[in-house]
Amino acid sequence: MDIAQVRGQCTATVKDSTFDGHRLTLVQRISPIGEPEGPVEVALDTTSAAPGQLVLLARGSAARIPASIRQVATDLTVVAILDEVTVATTQTRAGRPRRRTSSTATEGR
């Protein structure tokens, strides 16, 4: 699974009938600190995510597990809209663990 940000939507008037009723969304993976990584990709969207929102992606055969899309030809699916992502690392200093956090909010991105 990957964390990504929605970059936009796709429209296809001519498509395989299994895509009828499903949205195609443009997504780009992000790093743990919220920086874009890799190319913009097309994903089947089961959540109706809006541009700028952070989402959870399922890839490969896991992308077809949601019951509503089992018969759809997809290998990348938006399966959740994320409210917040917090990355914590632990460093040891003078025998004490110290926690640093990085949080990426979905609003305003």
Image (spheres, rainbow, N blue to C red):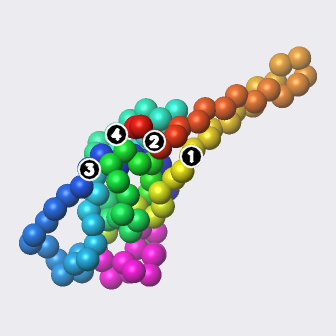
Q: Earlier in the sequence, mark 2 or mark 4?
A: 4
Residue on which the image places disc 3 = 8
User: Quadrant of the image for the C terminus?
Assistant: top left
Disc 4: which residue: 38
- Foreground disc of the pair 2, 4: 2
Q: Earlier in the sequence, mark 2 or mark 3?
A: 3
In the rendered structure, which amino acid carries the disc numbered 3?
A: Gly
Q: Nearer the viewer, mark 4 or mark 1?
A: 1
Question: Picture coordinates of residue 96 (x, y %)?
Answer: 88, 25
C-alpha gap between disc 2 and disc 1: 9 Å
The picture places residue 44, in percent across and down from the top left corner, at 32, 65
Residue found 62% across the figure and 38% down from its top: 87
Residue 103, quarter of the rendered image: top right
In the rendered structure, the answer to whether residue 95 lies left or right of residue 43 reads right
Q: Which mark is residue 72?
A: none
Q: Of circles 2 and 1, which is in front?
A: 2
The residue pinned by badge 1 equals 84
Which element is circle 4 on? strand
Label 1, label 3: how far apart the Cα atoms are: 20 Å
According to the picture, the residue beneath numbered tag 2 turns out to be 107
| Residue bounds of the magenta highlight | 62-72
Q: Classify 10 Å Cα crowding around label 2: few (below 14), some (14-19), many (20 and above).
A: few
- Which residue is found at the position 48% from the left and 61% from the top? 80
* 20 to the left or right of 12: right
Residue 28 falls left or right of residue 33: left
